[in-house]
Amino acid sequence: MLPAPSPDALAHSRRVAAHIARLIDTAGGWIPFSRYMDAALYAPGLGYYAAGSAKFGAAGDFVTAPELTPLFGRTLARAIAPVLSATGGEVLELGAGSGRLAADVLAELERMGALPARYAILDVSADLARRQRRTLEHAVPQLADRVVWLDALPASFTGVVLGNEVLDALPVELVHWTDAGPLQRGVAVRGDALVWEDRPIADPALAVRAAALDLTPPYLSEIHPAADALVASLGDSLRHGMVLLIDYGFPAREFYHPQRHMGTLRAHYRHHALDDPFYLPGLCDLTAHVDFSAVAKSGMATGCTLAGYSSQAGFLLNSGLTELLMETSPADAAVYLPQANAVQRLVSPAEMGELFKVIALSKGEVPALAGFARGSRLHVL
């Protein structure tokens, strides 16, 4: 049984649905799924990430790694510190969520004597930016003046770009491979309901990509032009340093595996994963797994070097997660056990350790990250 929304939340979802219905009507009765996903997540004042509902932690719809334990951010800080030292650059975090990761990374870099002159955050949500400010002012008030919020990606950047669970929330195109060829899945309105409707693919670039996959019908999956475009923009912006992205997903040959014939798109509502992306629009997060082969290709097309690819478990353990955990004595069970349980979730193959991957793209001379020293999976991309 799913938790019932409050009357205010339900009224908000109805406003979002009405907004989407107007978009469909204006477009002539049909929009591609990517446009639906963009509106449901990012429509100003309405979308899931643009309105004020709780999203992260026990009271929200999902829990991200930084919310589980500060050891995640501390480990990432130790991982990127050599790159910051080599480049003399800054940190740019994409989609900073509650601000918890920024606070933990900054605090650890301060302990290491490795603080960058500036920690920039690029987030499309004004609501989340306000939450991030509150988190940072409470957690690291002495460092708050180092943090700035950007409205757009800088034209030129040196340092480390950090993105945790960013690519999975970008709008995707849905493609339905049929005996008659690939079709683009979109959204229409029938009565008061949002419904699926397939149409021929009008975008030549999407048509070429769909045909190149040569999947055996019937097969439904996602193609990620928005994620590819973001990675390309990051590669174009990067002058010297590294882009480090953490998300759940697969290389292409696993992403488009015959057994994954229904795709990876999911809605997340109050810690429940749903197959119906039309459920309570505006109250649910919508995500799709990441095609890391496409990420690597997009980055390298801008002149970046593929500097590493591994499981989250391998990267965190190689980067010193266990050593940081052992700074807390197991004898202090009240403190140690919650942290140990969180670490188990981060690295267990049955939890986040295997499904989540870490990919790095670099430009210029930068040190190799310890996180990729063992367990490299570059060969599968």
Image: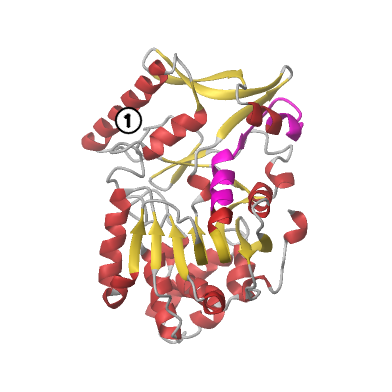
Left or right, 366 with respect to 129, comes to right
Give the secondary structure at mark 1: helix
Seen from this angle, which residue lies furthest left?
8
Q: Position of residue 275 (x, y in %)?
A: 51, 35
Q: Residue at x 48, y 55 (%)?
A: 155
Is residue 151 one of those drawn in magenta? no
Q: Nearer the viewer, residue 31 or 283?
A: 31
Q: Nearer the viewer, residue 42 or 315?
A: 42
Q: Position of residue 82 (x, y in %)?
A: 56, 78
Location of residue 121 (image quadrant): bottom left
* Residue at mark 1: 16
Q: Residues within 10 Å of mark 1 (few under 14, many from 20)?
A: many
**Residue 293 in the image: x percent, y percent?**
69, 49
Q: Residue at x 49, y 74 (%)?
A: 77
Q: Residue at x 66, y 50 (%)?
A: 250
Q: Quadrant of residue 97?
A: bottom left
Region rendered in magenta = 210-233
Q: Is residue 273 left or right of residue 174?
A: left
**349 and 320: which one is in front?**
320
